[in-house]
Amino acid sequence: MNASIPEPGRVVPSPAPKRQPGKYAELWKTMKQQKQGYVLLAPYFILFFIFTAFPVVMAFALSFTYYNVLESPKWVGWENYATLFLKDEIFLVALKNTLLFALITGPLSYIACFMLAWLINELSPKIRAVVTLLFYAPSISGNVYLIWQVAFSGDSFGYVNAFLMKWGFILEPIQWLQDPKYMLIIIMIVQLWLSLGTAFLAFIAGLQSMDRTLIEAGAIDGVKNRWQELWYITLPSMRPQLLFGAVMQISSSFAVAEVATSMVGFPSPQYAAHTIVTHLNDYGTIRFEMGYACAIATILFVIMLGSNMIIQRLLRKVGE
Amino acid sequence: MQLQFRLRREKKVNRSMPVDIAIFVLLAAAGAFMAVPFVFMISTALKPLDEMFLFPPTFIVRTPTLDNFYDLFLIFANSWVPLSRYIFNTFFVAFLGTAGHVILASMAAYPLAKMNIPGKNFLFGLVVLSLMFASQVTSIPTYLTMTWVGLLNTYWSLIFPAFATSLGLFLMKQFMEQIPDSLLEAAKIDGASEYRIFWKIVMPIVKPAWLTLIIFSFKGLWGTGSGSQGASYIYSEQLKTMDYAFSQILSGGFVRSGPMAAAALIMMIVPVAIFIFTQSNVIQTMSTSGMKD
């Protein structure tokens, strides 16, 4: 494998590992040969850097400043972070709620995505298409979750109240969406309803493209029931999709905000449904304390990335 | 195809009747949980006003009427910006954003999947990393960037970020990796440039992946407005989208739950219809969506 001799028709995959004088010249030559590739990459990546990569770096930098958009940023060091964790009690409530959402709805929706995809896979193709549509529909149909607002409406015309009153469970209507006791649970239910999205499709697709001879071979090798088949054959061969699905579910389960805001309002009564993202929007788009908002964003970023790393490590053990 | 599939199903191993029944019951229960809000929504959208105030409330509408749709348009007739403007905004943003995303993401995916260019692993690594956090993280700095480059309060503040969504590039790259190298080699030997190969060979092959990107991107843009981001980038009423207008005008109040259900029904029809037409392509694309470990 001499990297300095290109194979015919192919280009050197990477610059030579040894520190030769011609290393950078070589790299430059390769890059020039492949300039068409860079031209194709450019438009997407310019926008990607402007709207995704640069904002992340900027959030980190601005999180150490006081910045109100009108004046130029003032350096304050770790002050924003100290305030967040030591003085801002509402942030701690938001953090608690976000973790609750992530710890409850995250795993539940992930498991539901997989189990439902697995069960659907047993159906015949035509029924499967209909059922897939039914399960996937909530996550693509926009504002439909507002219908839950009507169902949980606080007067006796709300469906849940009417039902419970009719059957004698309660005597007077419960203010479902105003009472901090119920708010979080209702939002979790709605969030679960909405959560069969991209990960669910990836699981269905992964199951359909699975090599069926593996299962037959497994049966010969002594796999006795579908649970063993699931653990020893299906899950390991689905590992790439499982990882992808985890990434999609984790980032969405930490970002709960829209549903909470439109169901119970902003700010929610006693901040019972306040999440990190609503806190972020509060400081960013209402109070214009951008430095502080960026500190919140940085914390959210670290939490999302950290939990992704942990979950990915765990998922690699599946089926072993 | 059909016959082959049946044969395979008959050969199914390791299945027992009681568990099959249990699974059927479980699926039915989950299906009911998913379907009930939709049934409720359609039923509410068709209910006349007097039926809304029945106690106990009826789940299924008795005398369906289109009054709620009429009322919805009536509400908009009195508003400052006509409904047609909101509809135009939504379609404009959704179409342009989706078209640009599909084209730019495919262009960028081709070199990442099929060319050996220095730095491609780094770039793809960044995209994978950005899949791991929701876009809410960058909403505030993005807002500041938009202010600086003067995009705030224009359609472009919704369209440009949609061009560079990371999920689309990820799926497109994974899908393109399946294209056999020999096909591209042959074209290269015949003297075709990379642009020509991309446009004439790669793009037609990856049609299922475009359709997938279309549904994801369109769904995202169609629903922008009431969510945190769309609402904060655009403040002039004339540029706002349908979703925003609906949720703002109809928020709150039981009396308006009829028109609200009608609005929700109108909003969901388009993305669901697109998904119905693209479903098999979406599944085909998603089967390559795995992350390598």
Image: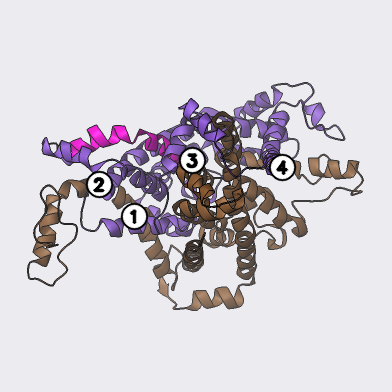
Chain colours: A brown, B purple
Q: Say which of marks 3 and 2 sits in front.
A: 3
Q: Helix or strand or loop: what does disc 2 sit on? A: helix
Mark 2 near mark 4, Cβ–Cβ under 8 Å? no
**Residue A172 appears left or right of B131:** right
Residues drawn in magenta: B195-217
Sort mark 1 into few (<14), some (14-19) or many (20+) by Cα contacts within 10 Å: some
Label 3, label 1: how far apart the Cα atoms are: 38 Å
Query: Which amino acid, mark 4?
Result: Pro
The label on residue A208 is 3
Label 3, label 2: how far apart the Cα atoms are: 26 Å
Residue B43, position as x, y percentages in the image: 72, 29
For disc 1, the marked residue is A50
**Residue B142 appears left or right of A123:** left
Q: Helix or strand or loop: what does disc 3 sit on? A: helix
For disc 2, the marked residue is B114
Can residue A111 be seen here? The reply is yes
Q: Chain of mark 3?
A: A
Q: Chain of mark 1?
A: A
Sort mark 3 into few (<14), some (14-19) or many (20+) by Cα contacts within 10 Å: some
Residue A305 is one of the magenta-drawn residues:
no
Label 1, label 4: how far apart the Cα atoms are: 56 Å
For disc 4, the marked residue is B18
Label 2, label 4: how far apart the Cα atoms are: 49 Å
Residue B216 is one of the magenta-drawn residues:
yes
Label 2, label 1: how far apart the Cα atoms are: 25 Å
Q: Helix or strand or loop: what does disc 1 sit on? A: helix
Query: Which amino acid, mark 2?
Result: Lys
Q: Say which of marks 2 and 4 sits in front.
A: 4
